[in-house]
Amino acid sequence: MKTSAGVAHRPGPDAAGHRSYRTPAIKRILKRTAPVERLRMNRTPRGAAATPATRLRGAAGLARSLAIYHGMPWRARTLRRLYRGIIGPGDLAFDIGAHVGNRTRALRAVGGRVVAVEPQALFHRWLEITLPRDVVLHRAAVGASTGELELAVSRRHPTVSSGSADWLGDVADDPTFAGVAWDATETVEQTTLDALIALHGRPRFCKIDVEGMEPEVLAGLSQPIPWIAVEYVPAALDRARTCLDRLAALGDCRVNAVRGETGRFAWDEWLPPHTAAGRLAATAADGRPGDLYARFV
């Protein structure tokens, strides 16, 4: 399956609904071989055969992510409350870096039409099985241009897999990343936000959480989106500042921060990007990652 944007994706809505998060679903993800046409452009490490040990690490990584993002129901309620102030019924939203789908589900729960994009094979398979069928799902990375991207994958901590070598260098010695090893690679198709907009239309909201590739994602966008959220990591704030510069170049916007999973804006006022850049260091001093929300005026 291939779209005009060159991205493999799942067919549109049907009556299948979604499936629950049960251990058999995880086993199916780890054991099955995806159809050739679905993975043609999204190759796992060349010449690398799955072994029982790598399957076990993959299962452990997936289970850890599910516990973090789906094991705390109050986080879902917090996200829904936050997103109700951003999108309404029928609004289009992009989830770039969908991971295990918690934000996709929150956006859908408040009435959004969601396009979810996830490059990692393990998470993409999980999303294929569990997401409601009215969510459009692509397997791809998103960056500054179309082509291919090599992801550095942490099988034990897949949440922090990344396509940015600079970001990996920034965070490698940070205590919050102690014990993380990027021990595999995946070569995946890369698209751009402009290509996704050409395919689906301009969204009202775009969430971007791609482990250091946020500047590259924004570099592939040539027009403002009413609302954009990008992740920041305290160990790599220069990349967040680059994002703020790019947001300013896209148009007149105001920025606020959300610390961690609080779902609340941290600043009393919405700031121009250059002012937000100065405020960010103090906000990130608690060591927790968070998100910068930009609304264009």
Image (tube, grey):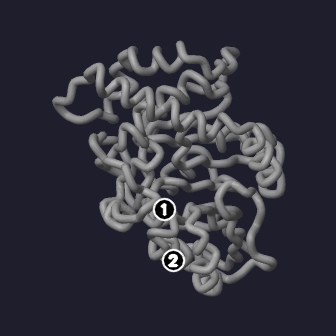
Amino acid identity at mark 2: Arg
Q: Quadrant of the C terminus?
A: bottom right
Q: Is residue 119 above or below residue 128?
A: below
Amino acid identity at mark 1: Glu
Tell me which numbered mark, 2 or 1, is placed earlier along the sequence.
Answer: 1
Q: Horizontal placement of 226 versus 21: left or right?
A: right
Judge by depth and name the residue closer to the eye, 278 or 87.
278
Residue 13, percent from left and from top: 65, 24
Instruction: Identify the residue shown where x is 75% and y is 48%.
Output: 79
Judge by depth and name the residue closer to the eye, 122 or 136.
122
Residue 148 at least partly seen: no
- In what element is the residue under mark 1? helix
Q: Is residue 142 above or below residue 135?
A: below
Q: Is residue 226 above or below residue 11?
A: below
Q: For label 1, count other residues whose C-alpha is less than 10 Å away and answer few (under 14), some (14-19) or many (20+).
A: many
Q: What residue does disc 1 label? A: 214
Label for residue 82?
none
Which residue is most to the left? 47
Q: Is residue 74 above or below residue 291?
A: above
Q: In terms of image quadrants, where is residue 34?
A: top left
Q: For label 2, count other residues whose C-alpha is less than 10 Å away and answer few (under 14), some (14-19) or many (20+).
A: some
Q: Quadrant of the N terminus?
A: top left
Q: Horizontal placement of 205 versus 210: left or right?
A: right
Residue 294, percent from left and from top: 67, 69
Instruction: Identify the residue shown where x is 39% and y is 15%.
Output: 32
Instruction: Identify the residue shown where x is 55% and y is 43%.
Output: 98
Real-space Cα separation, disc 2 to disc 1, in angstroms: 11 Å
Q: Horizontal placement of 87 versus 10: left or right?
A: right
Residue 147, percent from left and from top: 32, 49
- In what element is the residue under mark 2? helix
Q: What residue does disc 2 label? A: 241
Residue 88, percent from left and from top: 82, 49
